[in-house]
Amino acid sequence: MNFDFSDEQKLLQKTARDFLQEHSPLAVCRRVLESDDELYAEDLWSGAAEMGWQGAAIPEEFGGAGFGYLELVLIAEEMGRALAPIPFGSSVYLATEAILAAGGDEQKKRCLPELASGRWIGALALAERPGRPDPARIETRLEGGRLTGTKRAVPDAAAANRAVVLAAAPEGPALALVDLDGEGVSREVLASLDPSRPGATLRFDAAPAEPLGPAGGGWEILERVLRRAAVLQAFEQLGGAARALEITRDFTLGRYAFGRPIASFQALKHRLADVYVAVELARSNCFYGAWALEQEAPELGEAACSARVSATDAFELATTEMIQMHGGVGYTWEYDCHLFYRRAKWLAASLGGAADWRDRLVGELTAGGGA
Amino acid sequence: MDFNDTSEEAAFRAEARAFLEAHVAPLEPGQRASFETEDPQTVEAAQHWQALKKDNGWACLTWPVEYGGRGARPIESVIWNQEEARFRVPPNIFGIGIGMLGPTLMAHGTPEQRERYLQKMARGDEIWCQLFSEPGAGSDLAGLQTSAVRDGGDWRINGQKIWTSGAHFCRWGMIVTRTDPTAEKHDGLTYFIVDMKAPGVEIRPIRQINGGANFNQVFFSDVRVPDANRVDAVGNGWRVSMTTLLNERASVGGAGGGGLGVRDLIRLAGQLEIDGRPALEDSHVRQRIADFYVRLRGVQHTGNRTLTALSRGQTPGPEASISKLVTAPLAQQLASFAIELQSLAGGEMAASGFQDGYLGSPGMRIAAGTDEILRNILAERVLGLPREPRMDKGIPFKDIPTGTA
Ligand SMILES: Cc1cc2nc3c(=O)[nH]c(=O)nc-3n(C[C@H](O)[C@H](O)[C@H](O)COP(=O)(O)OP(=O)(O)OC[C@H]3O[C@@H](n4cnc5c(N)ncnc54)[C@H](O)[C@@H]3O)c2cc1C
């Protein structure tokens, strides 16, 4: 039994933590969140690219660092801890994964080095209306290499310059890669629940688009990409939850009421213990997800759902308790609690909420007829 | 990262499996070792199996060889448990002795005591019980009042213990007593080995909410205990008890909860209907199933992290202590939900195994540290939050309010 990361992987994680402590203190997240025109922290984005992080899981032949997924998940955890205000998840877990999963050799050679270097920032455009996307109700059309339609609330699309778009082709659902700075594309930046990760509505009017993967096979590829992204993002949620717990713990130890630290009140002690338990259960489920991702194991479906659900729940619990246990200051703009609170719900929404993933999980558990 | 045994571990597993295959029948798929009551036949069968294991070197794996163990590493003991769980074997009624009291004697007992008791404990020839809780002292164990008074070369014990699991079939007990009521609460305690067949020991079964009677009240009226049966120094009972409780957490932490699990719930939901459709297609049902599943998997994988530490010869981190706090309430919620799904038939005991689970699970949330005490422990020892304020420090035990006249 070796259900843990190796010493080298832990060292890489420590390097990531140190780097982000220096280059992505919470003030950086706040700076982007408060700015009207800074859509993401560009300096941090290029710093991360110099560390090789955007290309962590991209093979070296395509310009990546070729580390692997057990390394990428740990970088993701640190991104989550730091609330890094960069479109890392959309570009790395989603767009890059889509090209790795569906791109032809020529596409990979052309696109992946751009993504690895950070010159391309990718996003994944799925939703056209509120609610879970449905392969039978895709209105955006892909025909003759042109894309037409509207994608709403695309995560990180304010910062992105490329998008992988789910569209309906004559043969069925398809994925297409689009240059967001090219002709026929307009975008409207939206007020985001987490303004450190602004999204946008994307309108395509016969925009040039290159198909990604076989026409008609877009939905299956998408499912595969989402599962993989679920594990990666779960680590980001885990990192955020663990940090929120630490900050809350420290605050309750320093704040006095009735002549004693509020951390000595059992109502708070027990709830902090519950947050700790939720974080550890999420961590364990995330480890398993990482294993399944790295191994391309048949268990990946179940493992990804479990990691996603428990990490989403843990981050939400940790951040709602964070505000509550801070009292009045927790509700102020000035304190950092809302940064975590916003990020928790934004990450949950960006891949579909925990309820969706619970439902998927039961599907995975009962697939093949027998329970 | 992998789930494989090291080559040493694999060899150990193969050896364990070969022994089991030679002596007991494997469980059929879907079959579980039945949760028999502790009637005399079951106790006898359990003793027989324990003796066979001991005589072949498969009992008390982590104990030193000189005391009847195998000197195995903790990971090997886990591997043995995994393998044994795949076979139809009698219930393990030796856990309190072998898991908690034996290690306590190793740490605090005299050479004579270890010599006299450990081998027989290991073989199951003599079964042991834990006489800690009292009507006025459970979570607050140090509030105990059972007294031990010197009488020549012996001690005389008077008082009452309660919730003593297995007392009715045990040969020996480990008892914590108060030897100095004028000392502070934690200072006046002394720990003894007591003969459960001695004159003045009276054992009365207590009926549990599920109708069973696995625990007892034990009354002590002028029970004589030779000084040779004192464990560690007079007044040192609290420290000795802590050794026992640490070992309790180590052994209870590994338990998976027992009873019916989430796979059984999925099977049930596949058979029942809601509005003419399988319950398994109902979104509320799916949400609940997934929630149970995710938490149980989290505990299971946390167990794998613990095993990894053991396999590397490290001490498991604090995450090892969350198991019972998650699984005990979850077993209760799961049973409750399954009964709800059975609708009108849910009120019948025979409708499924979940009815038994519903009545059995509340005890798990209380035994071996209540949910609340476990949260205190996590908050204080893991998160470093302040200890509970106390009203019982700095005064003689006899002056502490007890709530009883
Ligand atoms: C099935 C079973 C088997 C058992 N077997 C044995 C055995 O073999 N030997 C033995 O010695 N004992 C045994 N026990 C006893 C068990 O250890 C005690 O029941 C347990 O420690 C709780 O003590 P209590 O019953 O006195 O409840 P109390 O301690 O009075 O607790 C009542 C309630 O108050 C809460 N509470 C108490 N203190 C605090 C606090 N500081 N903070 C917050 N909440 C608190 C508890 O969590 C609980 O909810 C067994 C119990 C059960 C249910």
Image: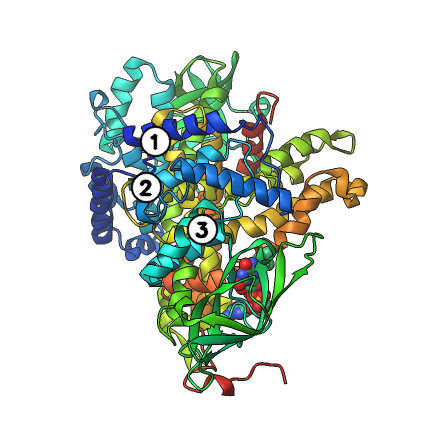
The residue carrying mark 3 is B121
Q: Are both tags, 3 and 1, on one chain?
A: yes
Q: Which residue type carries mark 1?
A: Phe
**Residue B234 drawn at (x, y percent):** 38, 75
A112 up-or-down from B189: above or below: above
**Residue B180 drawn at (x, y percent):** 44, 82
Report if the CB atoms under discs 2 and 1 are less than 8 Å apart: yes
The residue carrying mark 1 is B12
Q: Which residue type carries mark 2?
A: Ala
Q: Earlier in the sequence, mark 2 or mark 1?
A: 1
Residue at mark 3 to residue at mark 2: CA–CA distance: 18 Å
Q: Are both tags, 2 and 1, on one chain?
A: yes
In this rendering, would A247 be left or right of A8?
right
In this rendering, would B253 be left or right of A21?
right
Report if the CB atoms under discs 3 and 1 are less than 8 Å apart: no
Quarter of the image with the N terminus of chain A in it: top left
